[in-house]
Amino acid sequence: MSSQLPPQVMLALQQLLQGLASSDNATRTQAEESLGKEWIAKSPEMLLSGLAEQVRVADDPAARAFAAVLFRRIAAKTRTEGSQPQEMYLTLPSNVMVYIRELLLQCFADETEKSSRNKIGDAVAEVARQLTDANVAWPELLNVLFQASKLPDPSHREGAFRIFATTPGIIEKQHGELVNGVFVAGFEDDNLSVRIAAMEAFSAFFRSIRKAAQKGFYPLLTHILNVLPPIKDAQDTENLSRALMALIDLAELAPLMFKPLFNNVVKFGISVVQDKDLGDQARQNALELLATFADNAPIMCKKDPIYTSEMVTQCLSLMTDIGNDDDDASEWNESDDLDMDESDLNHVAGEQCMDRLANKLGGSVLLAPTFQWLPRMMTSSAWRDRHAALMAISAISEGCRDMMEQELDKILDLVVPALRDAHPRVRWAGCNALGQMSTDFAGPMQEKHHQVVLSNIIPVLESPEPRVQSHAAAALVNFCEEAEKEILEPYLDELLRCLLALLTNDQKRYVQEQALSTIATIADSAEAAFSRYYDTLMPLLFNVLNRPQDPESKDLRLLNAKAMECATLIALAVGRERLGDDAIQLVQVLGRIQQNVTDPDDPQGSYLLHCWGRMCRVMGNDFLPYLTAVMPPLLELASAKANVQLLDDDEHIAQVEQEEGWELLPVRGKYIGIKTSALDDKYMAIELLVIYAQQLEAAFEPYVNTVMTNIALPGLGFFFNDAVRVASARCVPQLLNSIKKAHGPSSRQLAEIWQPAVHKILEVLNSEPAVETLAELYQCFYESVEVVGRGCLTQELMATFIERAENALIEYQGRVVGRLEEQSKPEEEREDTEEMLYAIEDDQTLISDMNKAFHTVFKNQGVSFLPQWERLLPYYDAFITNADPTQRQWALCMMDDVLEFCGPEAWKYQAHFVQPLIDGLSDNIPANRQAAAYGVGIAAKNGGPLFSDFVAATIPKLFEVTQHPQARSDDHVFATENACASIAKILHFNNNKVADVQAVVQAWVSTLPIVNDDEAAPFAYTFLAELIDQKNPAVMNQVPQIFDSVLQALDAETIQGQTAERVVAVTKNLFSTAGVSISQILGSMPVERHNAARRYFA
């Protein structure tokens, strides 16, 4: 095939390649500049054709390989032709594209050097990928590759599979038997490199085909697994690692493919993990393969007779592989790099695997084999065994929470002695276990075990080793942030004494930084109780913050940041009055520090933003003079655009991978890089704006338009980051409230800012992809409507809202159907149960927030909302009779709103609600009985005569609700109390169709008290007061019972203010009228009622 380029062009290209490969920096830089400005920008057609020709004609194999590598990189670059960006190769004229394809295939077939052929194969694969993505056929390629897979030279066969692996789409549509044959031949090839390449190609191919088509290739697994044992026997770590990685992909995609051979796979995997003669990477890959089955097919793992016990044994064994050259931990203790990356070490692999096993298999499966080892390991003379046992407890406590919580005292008996262990790394692991348990068992750990935990961990703060001191302080953060102030108060003196010693003694800086974080957490939890330590701590913190800083030195920045955090959390804990003049001094110090923060990597910058937010909460409107200094950097962060880059260059990808705060997403053979650290800062800044708007209200008005226009409304559609959208959704109602407080509810300013806000909210309700975030957007909508108030929605806006809600309900129904289909599959084939539970929870939150949105619109728009709302009646009818209790509750709550805010107008929908409300009173879900009972009461109160027959007919059912066997239990009590209140509403507002009113009143009294529902209680007790005023026999004959129910409601504060005053007054009259003594009745009452009696009836 003769050259299509003039000789002078080929000569120039050869010189360019020599320059790019030069070891002289100046020569290479000049060549790179020429490549970009002259060749890529002006002559891409000649460049790619010439590189392909160089692959064919260069004498040196290295030169051919270099030309192939450069071709692949440049062919993949993006170039804009017209308005559409395209990859470089696809922008070439079709005849040039064909010429290059033919040339590359010829080069691939003719190349004699393996390394060069691999690079040419990569170039072929890049062209194939682009053509496949563009739906352009390349029929010659497949034939060449299939032929190459049968050639006598193994490097040809390997090269063919390498191209298949890179571009599996080229074989997706081929006949199954042909593909099967090619792969089987590859798996059974005499050459190991070919067998490995075939495995990698099959893994990529398998991932590229539809799930339904994958089952046709399950029989190939036996051939694949046969590749592994000879590699292990040869102790070939590198190739075993590659083979296992290919298997991991298959296990992730189709774990049930392995089911017939699973026990054999487990045995082989375990044999690799426990073979210490193999390299760590191969052993860890074998562990990863087995853990992948737990992630994706936990039921299959649970059923295997050896899986769990062997996995636990091997994980614990790997976890003892730590500190091999540092037996006394002196090197470990001297290291200041606490964040050293150890993710590739055996002990970390073991810990992470235990965590995954716990979360996927659960305590009922994992705890027995684990605790078969742990007590022995804790008493072992080898410190590594004791360390591993403690780290195992840390790893499994989250996943095994429910079962471990019941045995917490026994687990603490194992862990706590480790805090006094002779070896520092064991003490460190003991602190780690207690810290993790404090989070995973938050509540019981603090309430029931504070004495054993705190009395044993506080002395560890005085350990001789800095790393142990620091970790003990860190564990205390976990414990204290979940503890009530009453629990912490007795320990504060000793805690603060030890932490102050860490802060003031000549310690390593990381110990001081951790001590400050721990003090800050304790202040946050102890609140006002921390006040007595204020005079000791605050001067110390001012000393740290007022120290002159060397702008060139970065050593003290984090310590300063922690001191700021600590000082402002103490300020928040003790309050404005205790802070006194120190408040002004503190904000002045923060202002001075802010002026000196110029380096974007300075941690003081992000800490400052939170500190300002806390000081605003402490000082309220006194903070206003400082707002002008605080807002500019905050607005800059909150306004940040997404830093998104298309990475089509291996060097660029490698560079970004080395930087922190980037996430890479694979897209069509390339990567999109998103700078997530900047998005986290954006989210945090918007959250702080919410705090300022919340705290300052009208005083924040000067910033509202800027924040709403440039930050909050664009943030609602910021699809690069869910958290930014959520923070923006929380911001919008607060901004509206600031305007309302500043200018009034009927102001022009509020109306002007409301229009773009409501249109944007309604727009994103239709485009939000994440269910959890969609719920937040509905909350944003109803909170905003609540702020702006009555009549804020036109018919057009309400119609749009209903359209959005209808779409959301259709998608919700689709998800429900999908879950039902998933549940109907055999147990082992179901998707992750935990994921499904989270999805159900997200949907329940969404439905709840949608209900609140309907409630708010009905509340503010009344009957004007009905014409639009009627569009949802078919969904209501479907939901109200659905087997899913969440759907029934949604429908009941919706009807409650219609009854509450539309009064007699609601009667025209009686065919839709009468029977469902009656049935709802017998619903087996208490929340649905509550909603039905509430609806009946509202119908009695607001519906008028049209409803009298209906509400009277429900009285027997309402009494049944109050007589439920578990009527007063936590789950059922709100249904009970709503039924009680609804009977009272019927008797008061709509009793003309009640057959025997006095008999119902007599029975109603016994349905009291109401001590939980502060919405139901006021009406019920107001009705009781009327009965007392009327000297109704039902109350005159039951004075002790009436008094008891009144005392209980007063003590529970479900009645307050004027309602409580009236009820107390009429109850006193009841005693007087009935001639009964309070002390006489009190004598027969439980002691806990006496305090309330003395308080209200002294």
Image (tube, rainbow, N blue to C red):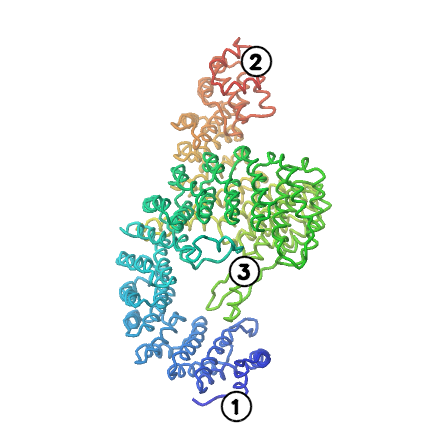
Q: Is residue 1071 above or below residue 10?
A: above
- Give the residue at the far top of this rendering: 1075
Q: Position of residue 556 (x, y in %)?
A: 63, 53
From the viewer's side, name the closer residue of 785 and 947: 785
Secondary structure state at the residue bearing disc 2: helix
2 vs 3, front mark:
3
- Which residue position is annotated with label 1? 6
**Where is residue 922, by image quadrant?**
top left
1 vs 2, front mark:
1
- Which residue position is annotated with label 2? 1069
From the viewer's side, name the closer residue of 991 and 976: 976
Position of residue 37 in the picture relative to residue 235 (left or right): right
Label for residue 608? none
Mark 1 or mark 3: which comes first in sequence?
Answer: 1
Mark 1 or mark 2: which comes first in sequence?
Answer: 1
Query: Hey, what amino acid is under mark 3?
Result: Glu
**Where is residue 926, by image quadrant?**
top left
